[in-house]
């Protein structure tokens, strides 16, 4: 009986509409109407899809016990046209038992909207009847969302915009922007979160439009020039913390503030567009942007419980051009190789210590280099250096530390640099004053090697190789890269490896040598992370005859 009543209702509705109405787009075949019209549930979000030019129709019934009904239609990017009509039912008490109803033949047109923005219509209920909703896409296939709500419920099923729905751009840099917005008004929901969408095309009017755009990007071609990998940081802002204490939180990274690290949000890398959700916080710093680029920014308040959302007024920002500094920065606790061109100068900046001292390890591998250290424009050190040396920098927590390196011989140079705030993190916390290796007490089958050390217990290794009688000095020169590690040596050339004690003068007696043979001896110091200092090679020849 209910199905027959619905068919009768829709037949009357279709017959009463003019040929220019949406209803006229579908033939009024009563045998097909039950498939054409779909029922809308009260209090639940409905997702739908529209093929361009093909309408979709919904209905829902109301009675006098419901004071007000609100219908909210959300297009997903493409413009749509939707109309709302109402059919009234007059009940006859004597016919109620037989379930017969007399319907008005003329439906009442209530509302019509055309566009790609979210729109809401509310109506008071004065009689029993049916609301009839027609939706058609005007330009392309698209998705949409519908939500019907009875105002008798206490809490609205979608977030509400504040009186000032603008998104404020607080600061713009070459690779990041800082944003802030007012919190959504109305009853607080524990499931409410804010989502930020940023792209290079245009502003988006609905949250579901950003979801479709994201899907298209994932399925399509990724242009490497437009790919973004964003990091989003939320932090408590002074100008909103007092007014909205429940909508902000201190979430910072070590780059912003060294302490109070609470959390970090990141998002999936997409081509040219990005959507990230930052929970209940009303501010965000978007990192990972490209310099000198225009970005459109939208913020949405999203109810995770109902799947509904509201859109803030979109904004845009153009990132600044990247500042091309001629001075590179030396990272902390990381070994860096500096290559010096012929007569070239390399300038490196070092972060000042947060407190106490800064430690610098410098190792010139090939030739002498000239090093100069300036703090706040004042020269603190200027000298030639070969081999490895530690420097102590400190007393200027807000200072500007600049290191200049220049090859002394006018040829190519290689320098290893390492800086740290902790002395024990140095590759070699203590270094000998000299790197001289001497050979003494030679016999026909042995020799004694002697060197000085710092007494810190440094690990050392000795390697020996047989060379021809007519010693080629160029061969020795080839081995004078004092940064070469033992990985370049043959295992057969290894004599021993051990850790030194507290003595500053160490001797090792090398045996099992052959009479009358020339040997090249090499000594290696091994520090943290296998950092190596190679002593200058020493050549020596054993005696011809054994006594």
Image: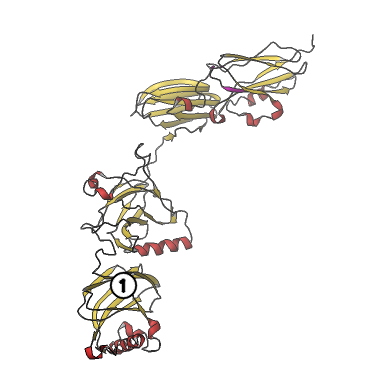
Mark 1 = which residue?
Answer: 42
Quadrant containing the N terminus in the rendered view: bottom left
Q: Residue at x 30, y 85 (%)?
A: 20
Q: Nearer the viewer, residue 45 or 150?
A: 150
Tell me, yes or no, if residue 296 can be seen here. Answer: no
Dominant secondary structure (helix, strand or loop) of the stretch shown in magenta? loop
Picture layout, residue 218 above or below residue 138: above
Quadrant containing the C terminus in the rendered view: top right
Picture layout, residue 505 above or below residue 404: above
Give the magenta-colored segment's residue range: 453-462
Report whether 1 appears left or right of 502.
left
Report whether 482 appears left or right of 247.
right
Q: Residue at x 56, y 22 (%)?
A: 458
**Where does the image place residue 104, in percent across and percent down from the top left?**
24, 88
Picture layout, residue 197 above or below residue 333: below
Occupied quadrant, residue 8: bottom left
Occupied quadrant, residue 97: bottom left
Callout 1: helix, strand or loop? loop
Q: Nearer the viewer, residue 296 or 118?
A: 118
Picture layout, residue 42 above or below residue 509: below
**Where does the image place residue 522, in percent across and percent down from the top left?**
64, 22
Q: Residues within 10 Å of mark 1 (few under 14, many from 20)?
A: some
Tell me, yes or no, if residue 370 can be seen here. Answer: yes
**Where does the image place residue 288, in percent across and percent down from the top left?**
40, 48
Residue 419 lies in the magenta-colored region: no
Report whether 169 appears left or right of 481.
left
**Where does the image place residue 47, in percent across and percent down from the top left?**
38, 70
Q: Residue at x 36, y 30 (%)?
A: 354
């Amino acid at each position: 009986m209910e199905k027959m009543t619905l068919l009768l209702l829709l037949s009357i509705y279709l017959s009463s509409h003019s040929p220019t109405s949406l209803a006229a787009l579908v033939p009024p075949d009563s045998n097909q109407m039950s498939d054409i019209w779909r029922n809308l549930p009260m209090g639940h979000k409905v997702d739908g899809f529209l093929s361009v030019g093909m309408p979709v129709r919904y209905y829902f019934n109301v009675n006098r016990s419901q004071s007000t009904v609100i219908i909210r239609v959300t297009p997903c990017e493409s413009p749509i046209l939707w109309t709302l009509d109402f059919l009234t039912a007059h009940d006859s008490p004597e016919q109620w038992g037989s379930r017969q109803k007399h319907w008005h033949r003329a439906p009442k047109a209530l509302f019509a909207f055309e566009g790609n923005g979210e729109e809401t219509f509310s109506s008071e209920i004065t009689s029993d009847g049916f609301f009839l909703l027609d939706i058609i896409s005007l330009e392309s296939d698209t998705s949409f969302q519908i939500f019907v709500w009875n105002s008798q419920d206490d809490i609205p099923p979608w977030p509400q915009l504040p009186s000032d729905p603008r998104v404020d751009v607080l600061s713009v840099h070459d690779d990041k922007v800082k944003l802030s917005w007012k919190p959504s008004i109305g009853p607080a929901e524990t499931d409410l979160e804010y989502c930020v969408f940023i792209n290079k095309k245009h502003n988006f009017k609905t949250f579901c439009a950003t979801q479709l755009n994201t899907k298209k990007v994932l399925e399509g071609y990724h242009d490497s020039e437009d790919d973004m990998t964003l990091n989003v940081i939320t932090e408590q802002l002074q100008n909103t913390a007092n007014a909205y204490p429940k909508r902000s939180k201190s979430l910072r990274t070590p780059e912003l503030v060294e302490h109070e690290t609470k959390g970090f949000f990141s998002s999936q890398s997409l081509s040219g567009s990005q959507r990230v959700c930052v929970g209940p916080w009303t501010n965000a710093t978007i990192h990972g942007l490209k310099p000198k680029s225009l970005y459109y920014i939208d913020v949405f308040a999203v109810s995770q419980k109902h799947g509904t959302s509201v859109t803030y007024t979109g904004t845009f920002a153009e990132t600044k051009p990247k500042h091309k500094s001629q001075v590179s920065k030396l990272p902390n606790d990381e070994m860096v190789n500096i290559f010096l061109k012929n007569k070239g100068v390399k300038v490196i900046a070092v972060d000042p210590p947060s407190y106490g001292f800064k430690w610098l390890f410098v190792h010139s591998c090939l030739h002498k280099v000239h090093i100069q250290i300036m703090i706040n424009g004042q020269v603190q050190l200027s000298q030639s250096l070969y081999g490895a040396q530690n420097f102590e920098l400190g007393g200027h927590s807000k200072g500007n530390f600049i290191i200049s390196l220049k090859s002394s011989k006018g040829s190519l140079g290689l320098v290893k640099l390492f800086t740290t705030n902790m002395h024990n993190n140095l590759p070699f916390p203590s270094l000998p004053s000299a790197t001289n290796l001497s050979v003494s007490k030679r016999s026909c089958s042995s020799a004694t090697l002697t060197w000085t050390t710092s007494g810190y217990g440094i690990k050392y290794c000795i390697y020996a190789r047989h060379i021809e009688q007519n010693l080629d000095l160029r061969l020795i020169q080839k081995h004078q890269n004092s940064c070469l590690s033992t990985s370049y040596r043959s295992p057969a050339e290894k004599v021993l490896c051990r850790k030194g004690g507290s003595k500053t003068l160490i001797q090792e007696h090398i045996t099992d040598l052959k009479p009358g043979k020339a040997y090249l001896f090499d000594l290696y110091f091994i520090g943290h992370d296998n950092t190596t200092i190679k002593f200058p090679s020493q050549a020596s020849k054993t005696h011809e005859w054994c006594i």
